Image (cartoon, rainbow, N blue to C red):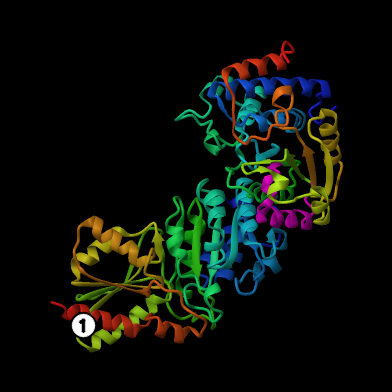
Amino acid sequence: MTRNSLSVTDLEAHALSLRKRVVQMVGKLRVGYLQQGLGAADIFAAVYFGELRLREDDPDWPARDRCILSTAHNTALLYATFAERGLIDPAWLDGYTQDGSPLEVNASERLGSLVEATCGSLGQGLSVAVGMALSLRRKGLPSRVYVILGDGELQEGQVWEAALSAGGHALSNLTMIIDRNDMQVEGHTDKVVAMDPVGAKFAAFGWNAMEIDGNSMAAIVGALDQARDTPDRPTVIVARTLAGAGVGFLEGQLRHVARITPEEATRAMGVLNGVAA
Amino acid sequence: MTETSITGMGGFKDAQFYRQEALSARSYGQALLAAAKADERIVCLGADLSQPTETYLFRDQIPERFFMLGIQEANMVGVAGGMARAGDIPFAHSFCVFITRRVYDQIAMQAAYPKLPVKLVGFIPGLATELGVSHQAIDDIALMRALPNMAVIEPSGPEQIGAAFAATLGYDGPVYLRLSIARTKPDETTPLVPLELGKGLVVREGTDVALLACGAMVAEALVAADQLAGQGISATVANLASLKPFDAALVERLARQHRVLITAENHSVIGGLGSAVAETLALAGVATRFAMIGVRDVFAEGGTTPYLMEKYGLTARHIVERAVALRRRT
């Protein structure tokens, strides 16, 4: 059972639903954050449904948990999650990326405090999370702070400044999840700059570091449990995810902004519904 | 600030007392400490440099609200944004050049765009350092002025620090406060100078030329006004400590009342006070004889402050020469 008393099976059902919404949203646009949306659906389901304590009717509740999407760009999945969790009206998803919609390509706080910080300029989200964790701890609030980074984002120097300060300040109320999907605009992250071992780097900075299968709900839930049970350090979960996960014919294709034809979208939805391959 | 904000902080006097103490402080460190005693939301962030940024007082007296992050300004600005989002009023400190130019994108995204009460406090403005180009902030006002939601304040000296601090705290949004390191003990006998955000202050009335200055150049402008008086030229001096929001109405009035208008700033002539005045004059359609005293479009070098101010044309003498030349021009 998770912090919010959902089972792994419950969360897997949410993840499947999120994948369908992602295919629907990006399929309609024919281009977008498809591959990373499918890849990180399990993480988002686990964090937003299993972990985060939020009040649907009071988004500014001071004692809420915080979650920051530091890349700000995996937004089909993010907005689908907000809708699935009852934080925004699902009808808004129809306006995703359309002019005038607060559901921008990169998430901004025009959407309110659901977007806890406007990021997208890479490398900044962890610093903001550190500030929140320090402040909430000083006030004695039980709130936990979660931050999701992309793996390419680790190339930004500010991430390591923030990692040093989170470790130095022993922020046990802070959990970082790295979406290790090997994907950045230029191509495979390791072909851009070698980054492994990722977990060991953070361990050396004073973090509790885990490397897990980011498409295994049981593994994600177990890691989040362990993070909460670590009293003296921040935790980083390096979650290895598969681009396009859950839709066989898309899996493993590293495309930062993917194009998808209406036929492919229909086929992908069929796969997710268990009626196509 | 609410009276209840100090509940549970035994040992401190009442909030009103400390607010008054902050307003009348002649050093930044004293003003910050006094205000923090009145308001629990105030937190102090450092990137090394507690001594030169006068935050050691806060560190020693309110350690639970002092956060030393180490030499990592980019992270500090992001942390400040996160703390502000959790209800704090963070004051983040470094030298002027590192709290602005070095962390521009972090400020834009984590303080200015969300209009958070993140207060960026920089020391060593312009050429006021021996260390050299790395530490000389000649474009910091320009950078901060260009950011939506950002307020920019540079007080004339110790006599205006308390008021500058109060204006910084009072603005519900991000502020860049540009300060000089106090090299000597402040003179307690000179009258305190007020500061209202968005308002300039005429500190000397004249009729022939108007000298508009900020920061340490206010004192130079006053010396220049004395020297001009010796030549039979009557000078008005205005202290434009609120660089943004800017007192366009005062500038326009002074331009209409004087044949010559000269700005003086310890900063590049591009993007700072001179630019703000020029923009104001152009938009108001006021034609006047106009000159800008400041660092020309060059990088300076390491050297003592008097040497650099002389070499790069930032002294009372340079103001006088420009004023006399502009008066003669037909």
Q: Is A29 rendered above or below residue A236?
A: above
Subunit bearing disc 1: B
Q: Position of residue B12 (x, y in %)?
A: 66, 62
State the image quarter where residue A149 is shown: top right
Viewer-closest of A200 and B151: A200
Left or right of B252 on screen, residue B49: right
Which residues, given as a range, are shown in magenta?
A147-172
Q: Residue furthest left?
A: B330
Give yes or no for residue B27 being in the magenta stretch: no
Q: In the displayed structure, would residue A277 be above or below residue A182?
A: above
User: Where A177 falls versus A268 (above or below)?
Assistant: below
Question: In this rendering, does residue B187 appear at all?
Answer: yes
Residue B314, picture quadrant? bottom left
Which residue is situated farthest in the top direction here? A275
Local secondary structure at mark 1 = loop
x and y percent of residue B43 in the render?
A: 64, 57
Image point (45%, 74%), residue name: B299
Say whether residue B143 is left or right of residue A159.
left
Task: Name the residue rendered at 43%, 79% in the picture.
Answer: B190
Left or right: B28 as drawn, with respect to A44: left
Rendering coords of residue B46 (x, y %):
65, 64
Q: Nearer the viewer, residue B40 or B132?
A: B132
Q: Residue B24 appears at what percent x and percent y?
A: 50, 69
Main SS of the magenta segment? helix
Q: Residues within 10 Å of mark 1 (few under 14, many from 20)?
A: some
Q: Quadrant of the C terminus of chain B?
A: bottom left
Mark 1: amino acid: Ile
Q: Depth check: B289 or A73 in front?
A: A73
User: In the image, what residue occupies the spot 39% across and 65% down?
Assistant: B272
Q: Which residue is mark 1?
A: B233
Q: Residue at x 65, y 35 (%)?
A: A61
